[in-house]
Structures are given as structure tokens and as C-alpha cells.
Image (cartoon, rainbow, N blue to C red):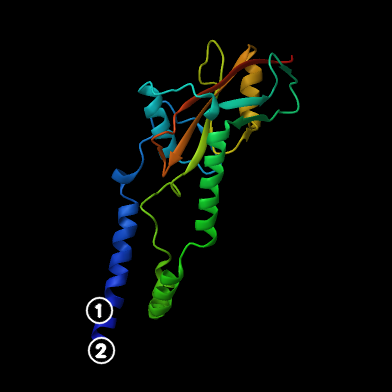
Amino acid sequence: MMRPILRTLLLVPLSCAALYACSDDPETEPQLPSGYEDVVYEGTVTDETLTSLVSSLEQGMLQDVVSKAPTLIAPEEAAQIPKTPIPTFTWHIGAIASNRGMATDSRRAEVFLHPAGPERRSAVGEASLLGPLAELFGPIRSAEAHGTPFTGTATWVVFSTSSDPSLHRVLTSELAHTPSQAAWDAMVAAAAPITVTLIAGIFESNRLAADGGPFRGTARPFTIAP
């Protein structure tokens, strides 16, 4: 009766070690598109989210769908923005994308609050004998080395000038962005009109959904007061 238990106790450390080794395998690391190392991530997006978005844009998949496009709220058209304080750029997504985004956000919240159903919790209870080993080796890490796969609506926010098309770039699951002091200083130093461009995509586990775009949104110029 004890032999199966002892065998299990001996195999668990080996299994944990194998899983940890796989998660650290360089071949499993996501490959960021070349030239996008400066992108700022906000919210719950991941490297893989960016990779999927960039791939679709390079393939010319950008769509004009007003009901799913991101629309800039602030700053207003032809605005001159004071140098201080640093402004917050805000936008909204078309009704269809917004509703779907809220639904997926709800699903993510449900998974976070209730990560295991009754069957799983029962199985954990039955395996309580392995509790000390779990504490010793820690939780098994996911093969996703860069966080939980993103599901929902993300916005690609690009600040550009005529001489610098990638002055400041952000991928975010939020509907607002406040540039860091360093990013804002770079915009001020550009001393030129800046265009903020928005593109939205609907993702399922880091990949663009079948009807997920990407969708062309606002492209609005602004200037910073001297």
C-alpha cells in the first residue's frame, strides 16, 4: 500500500524539476519583433500579444470598422497641450468591441477569483499528502513565461513625428495612457507636431480573434506649448 505513495513522492520532485526546466528553455521564450524592444506594456497585455498584433499589421490586415475602432477623447482636435502637467490620453472603443472586452474581462475576473472548480478542489484535498512537497518546491510554473495569456481588447498607441515614427509606443488593455516623465520629455524635446495614432485588436489567449481586427482608429495631431 505504501509503495505507490512512496513512488509518487519520489516522482513529484523529478516532475517539478522537468517543468521548471521547460519553462526556462530559451526556445520557449517569445520572440519580440525586431525594433519593438522599446514598447511600453500597460494593463494585462503580454509580449505574445504584441507579436500577434505586429504580425497582422505587417500582413496588411488593418481594417476600417467604426463600431470596433478606438476613438480618442482627449486631447481634443488641434489641441495645444501645456508642457506641465503631463496629460492623460483617453479613448473609447466602439460598442461591439467594448461589450466583448467587458465580457472577456469578466471571464478573466471569474478565473482569478475561482481558479478551481469543486472537482479540482476535491482532488487537491485527496492529494493533501503531497502538501509538504508543494511547499518545498513551490507552485508549478506555467509554460507561458511572460504571464497569463491575454484575452480582451488591447489598444496600440503610437506617438510619432515626421522624423520619428516611433517616438513613443504603448500596448495597453486600458482605455487611458499617461506618458512617463522620460517619454513626455522626449516629446517635448521633439519640438514638432506630434500625431497620436490608435489601433485596436480583440485577442483570445494572446492571438487576434477571428473577427478581432486590428481596427484603425483615431490619428490626431497635437502640439506641446513651449
Residue at the spot x=69%, y=22% of the render? 75
Q: In this view, does 157 lie above or below 112?
A: above
Task: Report helix, strand or loop for mark 1.
Answer: helix
What separation in Å lies between label 1 and label 2 (alpha carbons)?
11 Å
Kind of residue at badge 2: Met
Q: Which mark is residue 7?
A: 1
Direction from residue 17 to residue 66 in the image, left or right: right
The residue carrying pointer 2 sits among few (fewer than 14), some (14 to 19) or many (20 or more) residues within 10 Å by Cα, namely few
Q: Can residue 169 be seen in this view?
A: no
Q: Which mark is residue 42?
A: none
Instruction: From the viewer's side, name the closer residue of 193 and 59.
Output: 59
Q: Is residue 47 above or below residue 10?
A: above
Kind of residue at badge 1: Arg
Image x and y of residue 200, in percent: 51, 30
Direction from residue 16 to residue 199 in the image, left or right: right
Residue at the spot x=56%, y=40% of the render? 99
Direction from residue 72 to residue 212 in the image, left or right: left
Image x and y of residue 14, in percent: 28, 67
Image x and y of residue 34, in percent: 38, 27
**Which residue is identified by label 2?**
1
Q: In which quarter of the image is residue 83?
A: top right
The residue carrying pointer 1 sits among few (fewer than 14), some (14 to 19) or many (20 or more) residues within 10 Å by Cα, namely few
Q: Is residue 153 visible?
A: yes
Image x and y of residue 218, in percent: 58, 21
Quadrant of the rendering where the C terminus is positioned: top right
Instruction: From the viewer's side, name the closer residue of 126 and 83.
Output: 126
Q: Quadrant of residue 193?
A: top right
Residue at the spot x=56%, y=14% of the render? 161
